[in-house]
Amino acid sequence: MGLLDGKVAIVTGAGGGLGEAYAKLFAKEGAAVVVNDLGGARDGTGADRSAAQKVVDEIIAAGGRAVANGDDVSTVQGGENICNAALENFGRVDILVCNAGILRDKTFANTSEQDWDAVIKVHLKGTYCCAMPVWKWMKDNGGGTMVFTSSTSGLYGNFGQTNYGAAKAGIYGMVRVMSIEGRKYNIRVMGLAPGAYTRMTSDLPGRKDREPDPMSLPENVAPGVLYMVSDLAKDHSGKILGVSSRGVREIKMVQTAGFDPGRPYTAEEVAKNADKVFFPTEDRTVTVQPVAPAQPQPA
Ligand code: NAD
């Protein structure tokens, strides 16, 4: 018995990196998978449609079910073709993982309009283009699960990634809004901030010229994402999980109790109460212990 027996999954950008690992694990767990990938370079230039086919061949050789799709996620037509690949080959779609992505890292001052548009288009518009036809199908057919890929670069910030961070924070917004709209259609929408050694991250400062830590390979991240798309996570929607080979944790937008006098106030008063307005630390890894669920009271 697999965790995804009888399910049909679409994974975009699955010709390599994290998406390939998700597609292979989903297929191993019983899902029929649409493996999408345009197969371009890391900066989004070029295309090699054999990337998706290679992953499909490996899934089929291992006894799984999969079809390749080489469409560009960032066009409306591409999104429709990807959804149709699932419907025409497998009759339904239960799971969508929007994973395709590119990078054009520059400091903000050096970010050209082309670098801005290209990154926003693949990540943010790409998530819209792929989610729309699947959403419409799920809405009319009992629901499903979507996982959109964000990043700590957008959620926390990272030097040199304004375009990428903006797209990834926008995706977080999509998760929050669509999870609310999805409730009445039984559509779960989850956000993912992965961490793995792939071609996207292999030359980050400190990693260049170093052998990959085998622990941080995508195969060791995929089980966290399998959890997210499976019924094991059926009670969770609208949440974003940080998933790496070392563990899984929820990342959340939080607010302080604040300066909240309940009457009109002055700027000077806000300054005087800055200790109530701001968090005491910039540390993003403050760990909050989950509150234990209330115990049922004896009758
Ligand atoms: P990757 O470069 O190995 O994989 C991305 C895949 O997307 C590639 O195979 C590429 O061909 C495909 N792709 C790019 N543009 C496409 C398009 N327009 N249409 C279809 N396919 C397209 O990178 P990865 O590290 O596996 O990244 C996967 C996702 O995870 C990305 O969204 C990335 O931003 C995100 N992410 C990765 C990390 C990490 O640590 N690796 C961290 C945070 C977020």
Image (spheres, rainbow, N blue to C red):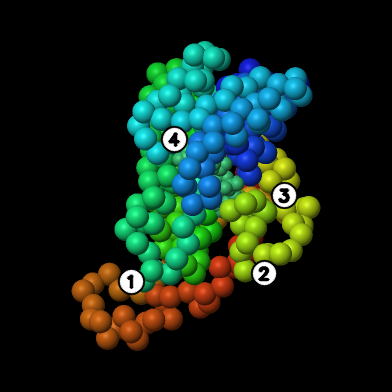
User: Mark 2 or mark 1, which is nearer to you?
Assistant: 2
Under mark 3, the amino acid is Leu
Q: Position of residue 76 (x, y in %)?
A: 35, 32
The answer to whether mark 2 and mark 1 are in CB contact below 8 A is: no
Q: Secondary structure at mark 2?
A: loop
Front tag of 1 and 4: 4
Q: Is residue 241 left or right of residue 120?
A: right
Disc 2 to disc 4, how far (Cα)? 32 Å
* Disc 4 packing (10 Å; few <14; some 14–19; many ≥20): many
Q: Kindly indicate the quadrant of the structure image that contains residue 106.
A: bottom left
Looking at the rendered image, the disc whose residue lies closer to the viewer, 1 or 3, is: 3
Q: From the viewer's perspective, is 102 left or right of 211? A: left
Q: Quadrant of the C terminus?
A: top right
| Residue, disc 4 | 72
Q: Which callout, 3 or 4, points at the residue further toward the start of the chain?
A: 4
- Sequence order check, earlier mark of 1 and 3: 3
Three-letter amino acid code at the position of disc 4: Asp
Q: Which residue is mark 1?
A: 260
Q: Is mark 4 within 8 Å of ligand 1?
A: yes
Image quadrant for the N terminus? top right
Helix, strand or loop for disc 3: loop
Residue type highlighted by circle 1: Asp
Mark 2 neighbour density, 10 Å: few (under 14) some (14–19) many (20 or more): few
Q: Which mark is residue 209?
A: none
Q: Which numbered dot is residue 206?
A: 2
Q: In 3D space, how far apart are the residues under numbered discs 3 and 2 (Cα atoms)?
A: 16 Å
Q: Earlier in the sequence, mark 2 or mark 1?
A: 2
Report the residue marked by disc 3. 217
Marks 3 and 4 sit apart, C-alpha to C-alpha, by 25 Å
